[in-house]
Amino acid sequence: MVKGQKSSATAGTRKKNARKASAAVPGQPAVSAVPVVKPPKNTGKGSKREMRETRKREKVYVPPVKPVPPQLDPLDTTGLARILPPDLVVVLRSLGKKDGVTKTKALEELSKWVDGAAKELSDVQDEDYVGGEKINVIVEMLPVWLHRIPVLFTHPARRVRSLAGSLQTALVRLPPTRSALVHWIQDQASQVELETVLGTWVMLAHDVDRLVANVGERALTEFIGSSPNLVASLPCITLTPSILSDLLTFAYRAVLDPAGLHASLNPVAAPIDPIIHIPSGKGGKGKKGVPVMQGKKGGQFAPQAKKSGRYVPPPTVEPRSQITPTPDTPKTVDMPGEESEADRSGRLRASALGAVRWIIDNYLLNLFPLSGTPTTTDATGIPLLQSVSPHLSSSDFWSCLHPGPTCPFTSPEDSTRTGDNGGSGVQVGACCGYSQPQVRRAAWTLVASLLDGKKGPLPPDILHIMSSAILRSAWVETDTGVRAVLIKPLLMFLKEYPQAWTIDAERALNSYGDVEHSQGDEIDEEEPEDESESEAGDDINVDHTDETDSMVEGHLTLSSPAFHEFLSFLETGCAGSMAEGYPLVLVIVAGIPRRVLPRSLTSPHISQLLDALWAPFYARLLPDRRAAAAWLRALLECMVFIVKQVCEDYEQEDVAMERRQARLLLVSQFDALWDALSTRALRIDTVEASGTVATTLDRLNKIEEDLFNAAFDAIAEKISKNEEQSFSLAPTFLYVFNNTFASSTLAGYRTRGLVDKYVSSVIQGTEAALREEKGAEEVVAKVEPLIHLMDTFGPHLFENDEYASRINMLFSAHNIILLQSSPASVISYLKHSSTIGNSLDRNQLFWTNLLTSLASHVSSFSTSAEQMTSAKASFLPLLAAAKTGSLPDHLRGASDAMDTLIAKSLDYSVESNSGAVAEDIINGILSAYSHFISPKGLAIVTDTFSQSITNYAESMLNIAGVPPLGMMTTADLSAASAARALSLARRLIDAGYQMAGDKGVELYVGVALLAFIIPSPDGEDRWSVEGVENAKAIWESLFVRKHDREGTEELRQVVSALLKERLRKNIVDSEILSRPDHIIRALLRGLPGLKIDILVDILPSRSDVDAILEDLPGSAVSPSLALIDVTIPTTPSSEGTSYHPIANPGDALILPLHPYGRVASALLTYLSSVRTKALAHLWTLRHIMTFGVYLTEYVHIEDERSPVFGGTLDSRPGGDTISLARREIARDLLGKAQALAAYLLGRFEEGIHARVVEALLKGKTGIEEGGLASFVVEVVRKSIEGDTVRDALVLRKVLQHLFVDATREDADLWLTLVRRFERAAPQTAITILASITGYAPEPPKLDRYRNEIAATLLGVKPEDAETTGLKYLRLLSASAPDPNSEVVFLPQHRAVNVMRACQTWIAEGDEDASEELESAMTLIFRHVAPILENVPGSHWEFIWDVIENNLEICSLQESDTLVTLGRTLQLVTTIEESVATNKPLREGWERRRKAIFGLIKKIIIVDTREMPYSDPRALCRELTMSIIENKPSSMIEETTLVTMCHLLADNSPDVQKMGYRLLQSAASKFTEHLVIEAGVDTEGTFKSELPEELLTVLRQDLRTGEGFDEDMPDSRNLEVSSCLLAWMVVFDLFIGASLKVRSGYFNHLRSLDIVSQHFIPNIFDILGLLDGKNVFKLDLWSVDEFFLDAYDPTDALSLRLLAAHLYHRALLTVPALIRSWMGDRTDKQLLMRIRNYTSAHFSPEIIKAELMLIRQPPESSELSTTENLSIKISSALNEVTASYMVDEQALELSIRMPNDWPLYHLEVRDTKKVGISDEKWKAWVVGVKQIVWQQNGRIIDGLMLFAKNVTLHFSGQVDCAICYSIISVMDASLPQKPCRTCKNRFHASCLYKWFKSSHSSSCPLCRSNII
């Protein structure tokens, strides 16, 4: 047979051959599968030979193992499948499936059936109720359930076992099913069935899973009647001795052979036909072919079918010792998730062990058939446990205790057993507990149960086996959980049976054979046979070199393997469980018999024990202090025990030698122990170690004084050496000894002497070192023992006067030296010497002198850095001691020198960055200020902190809320100084000090400002976060953390008052830059512990605010605002403006505010946040609206000096960044003011108009104060009293809200007021009238009032035109309706009279009419022009004269003329609309139109970008653009583009759009002019370049680094829009340009690199391609077209769409520049992103456009005019093929565009060439590529070049000798420059390139000079 190949013989054949082979070998026992029957004890006097013969095994025939018969399903064998409901049958069949999930679902469904039966039973109240349908079904089902129980209770799945247990509990609790179960057990079940069902049930009750066990135990206890909650009427089962014996046998079998048990419970199912009827048989054996059930009480019968339907196999005899070994490695599981064989065996064994324990604990007496008194023995005197001896006296059974793979306490003779390893052989000494901690835990729990005193002594056979099992298993256990369980049973066993050591040793000598000896038997002295010895040597895992018995002092010493394992256990540190194991060592050692552990110091066993105890220390196995302490106690206890045993056990003649050995042992052990402690090798607390040693010494003293003296001398010798490594150890030992030993004892006497000697030596050595002035290292070495001495003995050291005196003198004389060299010595001295007698004053004096000396020493250095370095070495140790509380509390700072030094150090630390060392010193001193600083010094410290914090807080308060960006730089050093001061002040306050006095008050105010007022909530300020936290902590120490110190409440009040005063002044102070809204928001967040009413405590009172407002001028900022609001007069204010000083903000993004503006801004912020306050104080609304008027002026116009915003400060250009940002701030404030006004004025009050008008007309004051009506009355009266523009505008805003719900009658009431006050307060009357016209319904009386005013104008004399006439003109214009409304302004005759009156004023006036009067007339003309368009007359000439005059005197530069200019342009627009449908009027207008449009054009040319922003100016620009936009194209010249490029950068969106339309036409004119110039240029000096004005717009910085944000402000979007529209103009210039002009444009762009630097970064940034985070999606948009009418320059989406369109145009116009930029990039991800984006959204449209252009070429192009030329287009392949026919031969050229065209090269292929040389053809192909790829030509341009070359070639035209092409790719010219010598012709561009590259003017062919 080949080696390693498995035999094909059966298992039976292999066993038979093995028996024959063993029989042939002499002395080899035959292999047997049956258990060896132990012979009876040799009670007679037989010889040992006879005993050996008796031991020999008998040769027994081993029959082959019968296979387990298949089990039949009762559903089929009993016919239940046809009786039970089909659904239930399905469920019951599922229970027999192998899949765990299927079983689980089946159990859940079956539980529902049982629950339904229980519910059916609970619904019936009749006690005699037998059962319903469901109950009967469940009872009928029980045979099937009992058939499945064993498998379900032992199933691997925990869920299955749990559900099965729960279901069994439910069945037990149902009376019908319970009765059926009891009846089955008592009358029907066979022995095997009972054993199987009840055995698995008991095992389920002891399952390894605690929850499953609880479920099974509950069902079991209720069924057998042991549950306390059981109902008395329910039947129970009684466990008889026979049942218990069967259960015990079943559990024993489960322990030894779990695999066999599993196989018997899970046989292969055999399908059979269902049985309808089962015939019965007679007699014991029955009839042939009829199954007969095995009888319960009879012998073995043939298998039969019973009522239960379960097939019962014949019982098989299984050897008791047969064991299923647990494999070393788990077998491969059959399916994923299944339980391995090893785990299953472990689970079954653990459950079985629990079942054995349960049976023994509860039913031990029932196992005896004899009754007797329940004692530890039965009536015959036999121990109770004798009944279980057959089961518990098996080594295989107790192998569950051992963790190893093989069992060392099993006899080799018992090791030849059959296993379950496939029947393939024997596994020697296999352990049931191997790799199964749960099995070992259960086994040790069983041991504890057996040792219970109630069960009596262990029988000898059990004791012999358990002795070896316990002792050989306990010391080798590796699992911590098992070790925790085994401690108690182990100690119990060794206490009860100390002879176990001897028993195990004897059995080991016998190789653990079957011959057992009683306790009194003598050991056989005959040597064991060689055979047995060799076999034992293979099994016992110990060193057998000393296994022979030895004689020590006359005693026979046994070699115990268990003892050697115990020593190994000690060597490994109790197997890792040191804290738990070492306390038991002495107990175990004391119980070891002398025959195993001799009590002699000459015995090697003692040395081995001590070496084993020391082994963990030398192996560094003691992990922590706890383990080390346990080890030390165990070592010393064992040592004392050994010494004591030696001294007590030996006779007089031997004791001397043993005692000498004991003393030597003690000296060596304590020397080693001291070395371990002093070298820190033994990590243990020295106090604990010294206490343990002291206890040991005390025990030795009690044994014998000589032993104590030997040990004490060893320790004293080590202490006296005073070695460096013992500095801390020696004082500790002395201190513990001194406190432990009484002075009257020998130990106490010797300890006192040793202490005196040691202390004197230490003090003397320190004095000598200081006296000799040795180095610092030597001083430290000498002082260190003294430090340890003081720290150890503490105050007790100073109780000795001699010691105290010497130490005091030593420290007083050398304080500085000691502090510098050994600070710990000074701290220790101060700590321990201040608690004895009257030493407090002496300590304080020493402390004061020490501080003074230190301060003097530090101050002796010249520089601050040197002083800090010196202070570091001196102060830090003292500060560390103060921090840890090591300094005595009574020490106080009282040194003037120290105060001076601290004050100087504080100044240095606060004012400069002193470094970490100085800060640590200062922080430490302040944290323990009471120890170092005197009260006088504390006052100086407070002053320093207050000054630094207050100064910085005041300076920061002046700029509170100002953004850091653009702000004037502040002193960073001041901020750092304040931050350091706050940190130090907090340190001082946290230490318990409270600031007081004036400086303290100022400090707390500054702290409040820095903590709560100055910081910005978003954190964007210059103040540090750490400083804010420190300031908050200081503030809370006073206002939040309440304390009862004297004067604290008064201090809070003073601080609160001063803080409010500071904030109130700050609000109205215009000479500082702080933002009032920032301060108000900070106050709204609140200050902890302080209540502030902002309206009362911080803001000025109502009268104060009114007074501040009265100081402001009431006129408008600029008359130009009249263009926006007709109520504003165009006459400049005559009142003088006295500007209040306002701080210059520089570049800060804040509004410079007048005191009124600051107050109003604060009011707006507060009331917007707390609107309920605004309702309660409605008077504030007037100031909010007034502030809104000023804000409106500032937003509309910035070119005037507003008295509220800026005053005398210079204005910035409108496009300036700071200017735009400030306007955005003003718009935000204006929006808040309008929102608040809308909220407060939006409340409707019934009859408010009538009540207000009545109160104003009659002067009544009966209106309720604080209401809306009262507020309106107040506003109107204020406007009437002053009649200022400001008050009138406030009134207009109020009326705008009030007229929302007004009726026509209400409007008539207000018109009455107009008539009443038109003379006394004309501005107010105009305002009310304009409000009625604009916001209220048309009142019935308004038309009459208009006519009255128009009629009045005729009566105004020319000399009164500037006064009365102007007033009525303003009233008439205020009453004019909206031009788009249906209301008729005036009848025609009234309009004619108005015109006549104006003509009269101009014609008959003594002087020229003022600009104000002409402006008012122009406004009236706009309203009457539509009325008079069909009325001819001189008035039209008069109107046109006025227009021309106004346009001549007005300009965009002058703000005073903007109103007249705007009204004139509006009039022109109106006339343009009228002449479009009125031919007679148009004829007259055409005569004057050219001149008027010329004047308007001059206005447009003006560049307003550097002018301050003004809405009237922007409106005038929009009006001019709207007029010029539709003017004749003849008025656009080539210079228009240059002069009007600035329109694209205008701040108006409409101007930008209209400007682009204008420049689009201008670009066409500009290109047309360049094409003409290039065509007539014969000298080549003309250059086609882009205008510089346009390039200026293109070069503007769009700040692309910031990224494109959709929420950007409109001003930023307008900047982006202007740049994008400028690029639109650039690409428009290429339209219609010739090749030369296009090349010029392209070369200009390339030379400037403007595309790479500006265009591409800006475009890709807008599209989101640069970073790739927010790429704009173009899926829904078309990029080849852009509609300007839908474009909004302020919308982000419009900008992105325009950018995409521009990129599309760039790819069409200048693709070479795009490709050049991409070629310079190295970011592959960016390039890939651009390529993908282009190919997805742009390339398809571009390719489509190229192909469309080729399909429909211009009629004049070569593609249309060339004969014999045909074009083929393939749209699918993006390919174009040009074919030229020559003599019926085709000349073809193919061009294919890639998918990402034009980013990637196109492919040009010569499909067919006829009659063309390769050089010429290659030149043509290169020409096509060059014109398309490098010259930005289209595909059609390349095809046209190819067509020209082919046509001219075949017509005889010579080609250029340089490029071999006929048509130049540079300028499309022919070769016209000849060489006079060789007569070859060249292109001019080619010659120029040749001359430039060759640096000569010679012919490239003949080298003759051409020029």
Image (spheres, rainbow, N blue to C red):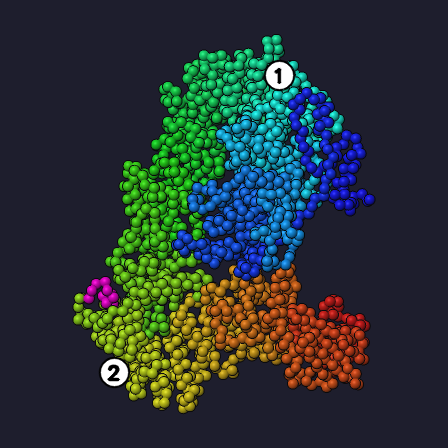
Give the percent coordinates (x, y) of residue 1138.
31, 61
* Front: mark 1 or 2: 1
Callout 2 environment at 10 Å: few (<14), some (14 to 19), or many (20+)? few
Separation (CA) of disc 1 from disc 2: 142 Å
Q: Which residue is mark 1?
A: 600
When asked about the image quadrant of residue 39, the answer is top right
560 relative position to 1626: left or right: right
For the residue marked with disc 2, what is the amino acid?
Answer: Arg
826 relative position to 1162: left or right: right
Near-viewer residue (539 or 278): 278
Disc 1, SS: loop
Magenta highlight on residue 1270? yes
Near-viewer residue (1356 or 266): 266
Magenta highlight on residue 1765? no
Which disc, if any, is residue 1344?
2
Residue 932 visible somewhere in the drawing? yes
1247 relative position to 919: left or right: left
**Which image quadrant: the N terminus?**
top right
Give the percent coordinates (x, y) of residue 291.
63, 52
Magenta segment boundaries in residue numbering: 1263-1272
Give the percent coordinates (x, y) of residue 1388.
31, 87
Which comes sooner in the sequence, label 1 or label 2? 1
Near-viewer residue (1627 or 330): 330
